[in-house]
Image: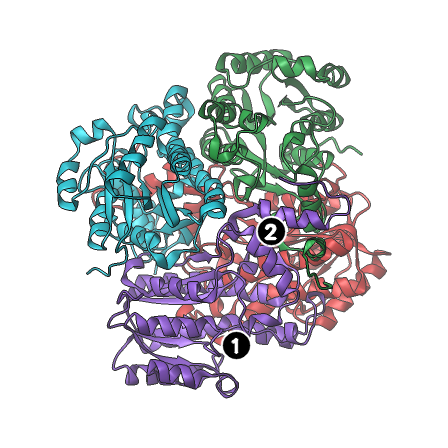
Chain colours: A cyan, B purple, C red, D green
């Protein structure tokens, strides 16, 4: 069901890889809601993903870019304004990668070149995007920028490694630039802190299945999935949330404010050597 | 502009007094978005406010209730289900009052009977509402409940008095009951922490004008007004935010995450005896 | 080992029941650190507890008081100033009780008279204590007031029931009164949010053993015990923390900032029907 | 007045420059409290500062190091263990620098090489320190590590620029490594979020005087100074805070939990064109 929430709006969506990507779902919903937009991802992602299919479906141009490269980002915004005939109204940043995670370098044995890459790709790219857009005056007044984050920015989860620090940095950038962009152009910048989600990117994280079982049972509404996250992004791009900025918005079925649920405790209890019945 | 976001949805709106009330604006927008609903407020408020006008405009029945009275609340939910032919999908709690504020009892000279009333009216009424609804099974699966709050729940503002504690309690109740209602009926419960707003209720707070000037200059997007707050409520009642629960959502132009803005600092600086120019 | 951290300091300790109480440990440590103080608890607690033993050991007078009763509290402060020959330097509030928990009224079936009692005993008593002290000018400049809290104030734990709301209210009162007391008398007011602790009071909470196993494994340093909590209270009463106020200080082995630990995940995983090995 | 809180303890203090430095004060107090330690700073800082004076006073060896250089840090820990005859018990990280601030590159015109340096010097240096120490097993069980932070990690202050993001990253690293170091060696890692402080390093921040007037009037206890901060560091190094970890501890006279104080509002109000009297 569609509402025309983004009718007449223009945007740029970074980070769609395949049909499990949150960014992919955002693109689909944005189109249903009346938006036109461009898509961007790295040349490698474009080669291995299925983004052509999405581009066709959404009638969207793909603009390849390394999001850590200012020139590439400049091109994305310039080309987007050309293709879409004007400034954009929304931008989605759904980008993150850690070579430390991939190469199984644990947090007390980080490779610092990898860490720099993690931060550059997952966090600083967001600043670069905003700075480029700001210099080009590429975003309309009352535009909306969203980056996807994760609760590891606030709380440590074993195995999430340097991505936790990257998300903390990302959320800080959203606040810092949100202030600037708000006061000067009425543009809002927020992060959405999403439940752990089965995506091709997310599947590399250690112990993902057990963790997702835990968060599912801890969250009163269960984990939020990629489709639901896309809905929340649409809402944040719409004109109904104009005064929400510099926020980190938890979209997680309630997980972030749970200490212990009955369902999770029961499962945990089953593992205990001398478990009593829990009611 | 309307989107049919609440098409087919039924609700109850507590707390509309006059056309400055946030609840009033929510009612207007809810109707525009396709919802049907009932209105409730205290007999006194009904007498002094202009809610008849709203009821007529929205084709909504008014059900008088003292929100601290379980029997009254039971009647509101039962009657609403009758009038609306079934369970409701959304509930708005926009209720707050402090006799300590009204009678100018400062925070270190509280009257404890007044404090009990503040908490009963402003916070516990929310629990009563939820408990009554839960017992009557009055809210549909995936329904949404919102209460209006204020940042005084997290940070002390001189003169806000025991309403700060009431809002902290209100937000805690939203979390506590959000867990129960989520796990059992997939119903979400959130609070929206709104900018200081010129309402008939809000106008009693000490130094309101200077405070609102400060928050206006501190917030990169300026203060959020009642209309914008109503939009955010609509979004939280819609199907696009199904997995957001137990959250306190700041709707404040960015104020909550500001430490100091240039605009506010400039104004502050003007007050200083030996102010230098600030750029 | 003692450091004379409280040499020459005078205080009042509310809530010691038996030698498992945190307040009991605080009394013991306070004496070791050179303080003199009075003890207060309800007449019932005095009858069933072993506080006489503590009083003798610490050479402390016991002043019975119902902490919800302003006259009783007035007597405690007046009598303490008499016994201790002057204003006090520190106050500990370690008081909490829920009849809803005791009578097994679940959170969606609260008895509202019980809820009022929960809030009056566990939260508002703290305001009363501070207001009485303020009116009597009973606390010295740079004095320190601490109340014990629990993370349920921020995050919902099944079974903790209306005590969660009570703790949220308690922490709000600490902030609100901390502002007043700080600006007028340089007195600081904080809460310490302690790990779940085996005390006679804490033992009534549902599923306590499994929960404590979980928090023990989640917390990198394990649960904090009553002795360690007492040390932290001493620190907060000392002259070395003069500028810390209006804070909620987590004393929990790191639990509050954990999302998932390896140790807890392994145990949880053992409960899963088709668990894989987690490393 | 000294308490022997650090009697027998060994440590390393990074970042003392001159007698306005917080690290300098920590060194003085640590010595008074019975600790022995080494001092480290960059070769440049050693040349321009007065650290020789401190070293002599504290009978401490100076070990020059660029804190972004793993080899240098390795040397600091190895040499410290040699000089102090064994593992250390505490480490202070008081390091931060932004070339963007120094070169007046505003936040929407950052130089990304400068940003990388800001993060490397102000945040990643802390990870490197911890990783080096962990690999060398250089910190004793129940040791304590503290880094100094600022509320800009949570809330945007104009002019604080990329140091805000650096502090957010720093605090995240404290959590992430705090988990590892806690679970493996019972070592705690915390940050102290200090009031704005007149130090040689801090004096470069724009509008510092007006800001400090504002925070002074907002904070019920006034700004915390460097001496008071040093006291809090000592407490965090002592055996009385063993179970506090992964926390960001506000040491700010209450500023962090204030929304608006009467004193600040009065001053702000004086700047308003048509100010009314505020009481």
**Residue D45 at x, y = what percent?**
65, 17
User: Element at badge 2?
Assistant: helix
**Which residue bears the numbered disc 2?**
D257
**Residue B192 at x, y = what percent?**
45, 61
Q: Residues within 10 Å of mark 2 (few under 14, many from 20)?
A: many
Quarter of the picture containing the N terminus of chain B is bottom left
Residue D108 sits above or below residue B221 on the image: above
Query: Residue at 26% of width from left, 79% of height from top?
Result: B86
Of residues D272 and C115, which is closer to you in this image?
D272
Residue D26 sits above or below residue A266 on the image: above
Quarter of the picture containing the C terminus of chain B is top right
Query: Residue at 34% of width from left, 85% of height from top?
Result: B79
Cα distance, mark 1 to mark 2?
32 Å
Q: How crowded is mark 1: few (under 14 residues within 10 Å), some or many (20 or more)?
A: few
Residue at the right extreme of this rendering: C85
**Which residue bears the numbered disc 1?**
C113
Subunit bearing disc 2: D
**Residue A270 at x, y = what percent?**
30, 49
**Residue B6 at x, y = what percent?**
28, 68
Q: Is residue D270 left or right of residue C212?
A: right
**In the rendering, which numbered label is found on residue C155?**
none
The quadrant in which residue C259 appears is top left
User: Element at badge 1?
Assistant: helix
The quadrant in which residue C80 appears is bottom right
Q: Is residue C241 left or right of residue B186?
A: right
């Amino acid at each position: 069901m569609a509402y025309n929430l983004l009718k007449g709006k223009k945007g740029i969506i970074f980070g769609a890889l395949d049909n499990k990507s949150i960014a992919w779902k955002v693109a689909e919903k944005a189109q249903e809601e009346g938006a036109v937009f461009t898509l961007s991802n790295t040349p490698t992602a474009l080669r291995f993903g299925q983004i052509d299919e999405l581009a066709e479906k959404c009638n969207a141009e793909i603009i390849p870019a390394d999001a850590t490269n200012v020139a590439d980002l400049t091109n994305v915004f310039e080309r987007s304004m050309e293709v879409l005939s004007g400034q954009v109204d929304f931008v989605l940043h759904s980008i993150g990668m850690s070579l430390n995670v991939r190469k199984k370098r644990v947090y007390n044995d980080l490779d610092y070149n990898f860490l720099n890459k993690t931060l550059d790709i997952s966090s600083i790219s967001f600043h670069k995007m905003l700075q480029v857009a700001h210099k080009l005056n590429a975003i309309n007044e009352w535009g909306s920028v969203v980056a996807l984050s994760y609760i590891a920015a606030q709380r440590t989860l074993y195995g999430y490694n340097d991505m936790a620090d990257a998300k903390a940095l990302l959320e800080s950038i959203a606040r810092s630039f949100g202030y600037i962009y708000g006061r000067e152009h009425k543009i809002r910048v927020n992060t959405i802190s999403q439940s752990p989600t089965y995506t091709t990117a997310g599947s590399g994280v250690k112990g993902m299945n057990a963790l997702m079982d835990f968060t599912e049972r801890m969250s009163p509404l269960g984990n939020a999935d990629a489709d639901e996250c896309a809905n929340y992004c649409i809402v944040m791009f719409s004109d109904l949330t104009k005064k929400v900025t510099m926020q980190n918005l938890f979209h997680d079925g309630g997980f972030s404010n749970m200490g212990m649920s009955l369902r999770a405790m029961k499962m945990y209890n089953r593992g205990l050597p001398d478990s009593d019945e829990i009611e």
